[in-house]
């Protein structure tokens, strides 16, 4: 569930980069989410795939 949640956050942030009109640095938020998602996913692949 943690990996799915991190992936959802990455995808939501990427879409927000394109469409949101809020004054927020979604690019930086996307990068920070990816920094959490990528090692979690690599660990999952190592353990389960």
Image (cartoon, rainbow, N blue to C red):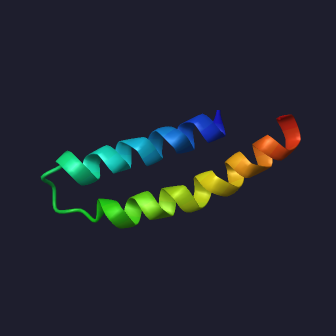
Q: Is residue 19 above or below residue 28?
A: above
In depth, the one of 42 and 22 nearer the eye is 42
Residue at the far right: name it: 47
The answer to whether 47 appears left or right of 17 in the picture is right
Tell me residue 26's x, y (percent).
Answer: 31, 59
Say whether residue 22 is left or right of residue 16: left
Among the 4 quarters of the image, the one containing residue 2: top right
Q: Residue at x 28, y 65 (%)?
A: 25
Q: How many marks?
A: 0
- Residue at x-position 63% and y-position 54%: 38
Determine the residue positioned at 63% across, 40% down: 3
* Quarter occupied by residue 35: bottom right
Q: Looking at the figure, which quarter contains the N terminus?
A: top right
Q: In x, y percent, where is residue 46?
A: 84, 46
**Residue displayed at 50% across by 56% down:** 33
Farthest left residue in view: 21
The image shows residue 39 at horizontal and vertical percentages of 69, 56
Q: Quadrant of the C terminus?
A: top right
x and y percentages locating residue 12 in the rendered image: 37, 42
Q: Work out whether 23 lies above or below 6.
A: below
């Amino acid at each position: 569930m943690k990996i799915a949640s991190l992936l959802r956050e990455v995808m939501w942030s990427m879409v927000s980069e394109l469409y949101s009109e809020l004054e927020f640095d979604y690019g930086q938020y996307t990068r920070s989410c990816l920094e959490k998602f990528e090692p979690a996913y690599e660990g999952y692949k190592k353990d389960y795939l």
